Amino acid sequence: MQKQATVFSQLLQLIPWGVFDRAVAAHRADKGRRTLSTRSHLAALLAGQLFDAYGLRDIEAVMAIHAGSLRRRNIEPARRSTLSDANATRTPEVFEAIVPALLAKLSPQPLAETEKALRIIDSTLVRPGARAAEWARFEKRSVAAKVHVVYDPACQAPVFFHLTCGNSSDITVAKTAMPTTAGATYVFDLGYHDFGFWAALDAAGCRLVTRLKRNTKVTVKGERPIAGETGILADTIVALSQRLSLSRRNPFPRDGRMIVVHRDDGKPLTLFTNDLASPACQITGAAGTSSCSSAGSSSI
């Protein structure tokens, strides 16, 4: 009789177990534990998500049903009390270690296609539970953590994420932890207004699309034609200030481009990019505005 794998079993096949086992060894996550292994712990957490469990009792029941197939993967069913203890004491870093390997499977991309890649950089606050209150302290009275994400709209999935305390700086994470795909287009808001970051992207052959702060000084060096590009109000070549102060030179000294886009609310949107050649319609489309044939709002 032919056996067919359950959905849960198929899900477990997608886990990069080699990466996971190395993380378990590196973090010594199984040291001194004789009941629930880290591998079994991961399976229990996945079961809770897959079967929309309301509590540990539901997870225990699901694991018991799949006990036979789980044991073939060296996974033991989790009892409620044991799982509760593991949730409280085991480091989450061992589970985070497999995320990059899973994300890499979502959008395998030939090097020749990187110039077509679009990456959206942003962050969002999340409200953790009471146990994370001291770690995630944000402002005076509220508690939050922050998730920093690089999103690939082509596969509708993140290609990078980083979790920090809520008051961490977006640009600090971008400059110190975020990987860069050479040749890709990066779209981001004013939280990443840093000429050093822009210079690093430009040096990697990347295009950037963002906004300028109101007090950013620019010198207009030329106008580009906008005939036939509906929704584009202006397209100019500009130069940023060569110095940030008497003792600091601007690390991004090259010419840029300012494109003013019409929006439905009547307030024009001004974008800045290091792309001096592409049609304005293509750049505003990357920034999340409507196509040039119809005006719209921006996600920046």
Image (cartoon, rainbow, N blue to C red):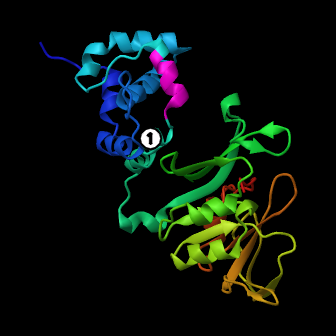
Q: Position of residue 84 (x, y in %)?
A: 52, 19
Q: Residue 169 in the image: state x and y as whole percent.
A: 71, 58
**Spot occupied by residue 228 in the image (x, y as percentages of width and height):** 69, 70
Answer whether residue 89 is magenta in the image.
Answer: yes
Picture layout, residue 58 above or below residue 248: above
The magenta span reads 82-90
Q: Residue, x 35% and y 24% (percent of image)?
A: 34
Q: Is residue 56 left or right of residue 11?
A: right
- The crowding category of the residue bearing disc 1, from other C-alpha atoms within 10 Å (few below 14, some 14 to 19, many at least 20), is many
Residue 187 visible, this angle: no
Q: Amino acid at mark 1?
A: Val
Residue toward you, 271 or 240: 240
Is residue 136 on the magenta stretch? Answer: no
The residue shown at (44%, 41%) is 94
**Quadrant holding the C terminus:** bottom right
Q: Nearer the viewer, residue 89 or 265?
A: 89
Above or below for 171 versus 148: below
Q: Is residue 26 left or right of residue 81?
A: left
On the image, which quarter does residue 232 sit in? bottom right
Question: Where's residue 127, x and y in %?
Answer: 71, 35
- Most distant residue in the front direction: 32
Q: How many marks?
A: 1
For the stretch drawn in magenta, the main secondary structure is helix
Secondary structure at badge 1 equals: helix
Q: Pick whichever, 33 or 236, lies toward us.
A: 33
> Quick check: 144 left or right of 74?
right
Q: Which residue is the site of mark 1?
A: 94
- Give the residue displayed 56% in from the left and 58% down from the top: 119
Q: Is residue 279 visible?
A: yes
